[in-house]
Amino acid sequence: MKLKKYLSFTKVGLREGFQYRSDALSGIGATMISLVLFYFIWKAISASGELAQPFSVIISYVALARVIDNATSADLENWIGDRVRKGTIVNELKKPISLKKQLYFYQLGKSSFKMIVRGIPALIIGILFLNVGVPGLINSFYFIISMFLTLNLAIFLSYTTSMIVFWTKVGWSLRMTRSMVAGLFSGAMIPLYLVPDNIRALFNLTPFPSMVDGPISIYQGTAENVFSVFGIQLMWLVILGLLSEMLWRKAKKKLTVQGG
Amino acid sequence: MSLIKAENLDKTFRIYSQGSGIKGYLKSFVKRDYEEIHAVEGLELEIDEGEMIGYIGSNGAGKSTTVKMLTGILEPSSGLIEVDGRNPHRERKKNAVNIGVVFGQKTQLWWDLPVKESFKLLKEIYEVDEEAYDERIEEFDEVLQISEFWEQPVRKLSLGQKMRCELAAAFLHHPKIVYLDEPTIGLDVAVKERIRDFIRKMNEEKNITVMLTTHDIGDIEDLCERIVVLDEGKKIYDGALDDLVNRFSSRRLVMEIKRPEDFDIDIDGVTEVKRTDGGLEVVFDRTEISASDLMREILDDYEVLDFQIKEPDIEEVVKKVYNEGI
């Protein structure tokens, strides 16, 4: 694989993000608003006094979850959906490159943009106002590794669901479903320690908890074993990698049978 | 050995019918009836290096399907394809280095980014070195004049500007073969002319083989010596363009005479006499009577002011081929 070739897709993804200034600015705005919203929702829930943790602990988790969610988003379903419906997917298949690698590096650029305009501002606000705290040097280092794995998981996951577009022809409904399920199961919406154990066990059968709850536990120093968090993330990367490859092979057949 | 070879090529699609009315839609939503469509049937094709062939046929004749199979995007249902000694589907990426493709109406440029960004990306994808890249862009610019909108985002370009970029993009890496699927569709005469000049130049100077799918007879007349005509997935003609035109043996003699109202002839081989605003039109079959014999007979009886012999135009021939076959 020639890395330089594919890195130019990362550049394009990043470039596309910064193409529209208003889009970048509204990204920052949306993150702020979502933080404010989550702040008041959880304040109201905490006021009932029935939660196991005090508000200051919960808001720290919730704010971190917003940071991770914003910094590691991926949306390949719409990209593929658009091209499958219009038939322009042929323009991707005529090139001497792998579609999967092209999309991976492209999304890496897009996600970097999101990390800059959404993730980092959210982290700063979290540290300044929402009790997020700053971890020690070692945990910061582990957290960055874990975030990178989450980003990869997000891209792999989005790529896997986007393969289904070859059957459904529509991307956005798949993306909505994927992000709703991910939001609920990962800890991005509700701190997972508030979820009852038996349901939590169910969540753990999916890759989602390792994407948000995992990195948070490293950041906050509550992870029992940092390397088991990495291990679970890597395991899901392998599983999603295999699953998407399988779907892609079927999708290619499908494309061939129905004529693109 | 030929550069592109297809033997007994078949492509069958399965599509489902939607049904009609709300009842039909609901029914097809639950249970789908599939139908088999034979897009290409028993196609034999050989194209040599440096050739420029026109691939024509009415809508849905199977032209684009053929191009998609030759580029390796679709796998044939049966039959054999070899492009530069490779199976293009099995070795899609290797084959892709050697080819350039324009699917008309389907832009490959990055919509939100300036034109030059798309080209920079293509330069990396096809591994064109810096020097060759600069040289080629300059060369393309001479004919296609793409530098006018080099910095503009693609979404702001007109159709003609976009198509000029698409053309340049397809030839950027100097591939062995370029497939052009309706490259002049919807363009004005000036842009068409420019695009044809460019294709001709690339073919002549770089010996790039071109397979051109089009509905525009002007493209064919200007560019292609050889044409392949496809009808309902089957090849119905493969040969020189001139030969096809000559198969249709009727010719027209257009003339102006004194006192056209008196004109009345009975000559073997003349199939029709039409009176037009400017004068008379005599349709004749040249296998039965030569133009000179016909002229001589007419000149004996009438005073001819002006005359002209018209060959059938290609458009007419093609229309005839589509409608009646060969």
Image: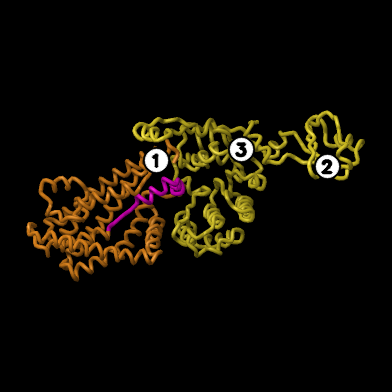
Chain colours: A orange, B yellow
Cα separation between marks 2 and 3: 35 Å
Residue range in magenta is: A72-93
Instruction: For label 3, count other residues whose C-alpha is less than 10 Å away and answer few (under 14), some (14-19) or many (20+).
Output: some
Q: Which residue in the protein does label 2 denote?
A: B255
The residue under the point 13% across, 57% down is A223
- Mark 1: which amino acid? Lys
Residue A196 located left or right of residue B212: left
Looking at the rendered structure, which numbered label has been put on residue B228? 3
Mark number for residue A199? Answer: none
Q: Say which residue label 1 marks.
A: A252
User: In which chain is the residue bearing label 2?
Assistant: B
Element under disc 3: strand
Quick check: is B80 in the magenta stretch? no
Q: Residue furthest right?
A: B300
* Nearer to us in this view, A77 or B97: A77
Pointer 2 and pointer 1 on the same chain? no
Mark 1 residue crowding within 10 angstroms, few (<14) / some (14–19) / many (20+) = some
Please state which of the two labelled residues, at mark 2 or mark 1, is closer to the viewer.
Answer: 2
- Amino acid type of the residue tagged 2 in the rendering: Met
Q: Is residue B188 above or below residue B30?
A: below
Q: In this image, A258 relative to A226: left or right?
A: right
Q: Quadrant of residue A110?
A: bottom left
Type of amino acid at the residue the image marks with label 3: Val
Disc 2 to disc 1, C-alpha distance: 61 Å
Q: Main secondary structure of the magenta part?
A: helix
Q: Residues within 10 Å of mark 2 (few under 14, many from 20)?
A: some
Image point (20%, 59%), residue name: A65
Q: Quadrant of residue B215?
A: top right
Which badge, 2 or 3, comes first in the chain's sequence?
3
Q: Chain of mark 1?
A: A
A145 vs B255, left or right, is: left
Gap in angstroms between the C-alphas marked 1 and 3: 29 Å
